[in-house]
Image (spheres, rainbow, N blue to C red):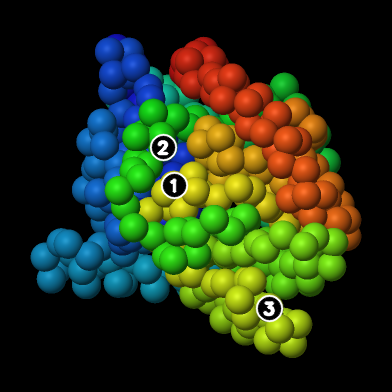
Amino acid sequence: MKKLLIVIPHFCSGGTLSSLESLLSVYDKNRWQIDVFALHQYGQGRSRLNNCTILQENLWLSSIVENGNWLQKIASFVLRCVRATCRIFGFNVYKYWGPRGGKQIGTGCYDAILAFQESLTPIVCYYPAKKRIIWIRCEYNRYCSDNRELKYFEYFDSIVCVSEFTKQSVLDVIPEVANKLIVINNCLDVDGIRNSVSSNIKLDDVFNNACFTIISVGRLDPVKQFETIPLISDQIRKNTQIQFKWVIIGNSTGFESVKQAIIDRINKLHLENVVQLLDETNLIYNYISRADLLVQTSKSETFSRVVHEAKVLGVVPILNTYGCSAEFVRSGYDGIITPIENMGETIAELINKPSVLSGIRKNLLEDSYNNNFLISQIDKLI
């Protein structure tokens, strides 16, 4: 049995935590033993991680010691101040503290360490290990515009990208690591997603009528371009006589200005009964499953979980033409890809021609997400 250590930044909700949650739900427990270590021991997502052992915080590796005694907390505060001071003067403390902390939690005893997000690159690279693997989940050339991290990547045996688009974004910046790059999509807990849906759960009234329903899901980050939804809805309204509603579900914390921009456009275009904003919910799969369309207006994505989740639930996804959209949707077969400026007319046409949607739904139900292949790819690396 292979013993793996997965390192994450924290237990807060987000794509990294959701990806790890799915991996822990589908991997072969007879082949791997997985431990998880979080640099920041805060966040509500700890309870979502099953089929693993979660390691305790470590004075040298954890960013903040929260559960230790008063002496450990004082020492953690002092070390945090030292780290901050060293960063100001360009001194890399992890080069010295990483090996010490790594020995304390036994990183060298694992068959492989999996750093599960790109932000961990300059930290995990110094942990003692038989093998180190880093996951890149972002559009890397936006995350880092030069090759300053090449010196860290040299410590890793493999660099996993969640899409071909992500891989190319790394090559654009650091072509020297081409031989280490591999594309492995995120796992999806297909059975868990489908089993979480129940017709007995009462949702917001917008989902309890016969109205054609569109849904968009995600934090209200400007990159999602949710502020364009009222404008697109106005285009739809001009091209169909059929009543519809568009529901946006997502966390607005830190993005209050985007939320206000959406509200202002809703009011300006008199779409109060058409476009609605709902808060983040743990019943999200129930909402998605009762929608007719899932629309993604993003200007950039590297691996869109919500698109795959919609497909698993038989809900047709409509995507803007961002970098990797064609990797995950075959336009006209299991979804639609359209430039955002044409999205209103495209959606109106689908509303007016339900037979087109029915054909795509049929294709979705016949497709399957291949977790076994993804797990086998990871297994080869470790």
Q: CA distance from mark 3 to mark 1?
A: 25 Å
Q: Is residue 170 above or below residue 131?
A: below
The vertical placement of 163 against 91, above or below, is above
* Residue kind at label 3, given as amino acid type: Leu
The number of discs equals 3
**Residue drawn at (62%, 64%), measured in percent from left and top?**
245
Direction from residue 239 to residue 6 in the image, left or right? left
In space, the residues marked 2 and 1 are separated at their CA atoms by: 7 Å
User: Can you tell which mark lies on residue 336?
Assistant: none
Q: Is residue 102 visible?
A: no
- In this view, the residue farthest toward the left is 69
Please give the residue where the numbered disc 3 appears in the rendered image. 271
Q: Quadrant of residue 260?
A: bottom right
Q: Nearer the viewer, mark 3 or mark 1?
A: 3
Image quadrant holding the N terminus, namely top left
Q: Which residue is the site of mark 2?
A: 193
Residue at label 1?
285
Residue 185 position (above or below residue 81): above
Q: Earlier in the sequence, mark 2 or mark 1?
A: 2
Q: Please report the residue visible at 47 percent of the width from the left and 40 percent of the height from the top.
A: 19
Label 3 residue SS: loop
Badge 2 density bin: few <14, some 14–19, many ≥20, Cα 10 Å: some
Q: Quadrant of residue 30?
A: top left
Amino acid type, label 2: Ile
Give left or right: position of 140 versus 42: right
Q: CA distance from mark 2 to mark 3?
A: 32 Å
Give coordinates of residue 298: x percent, y percent: 72, 56
Q: Are marks 2 and 1 in contact (CB under 8 Å)?
A: yes
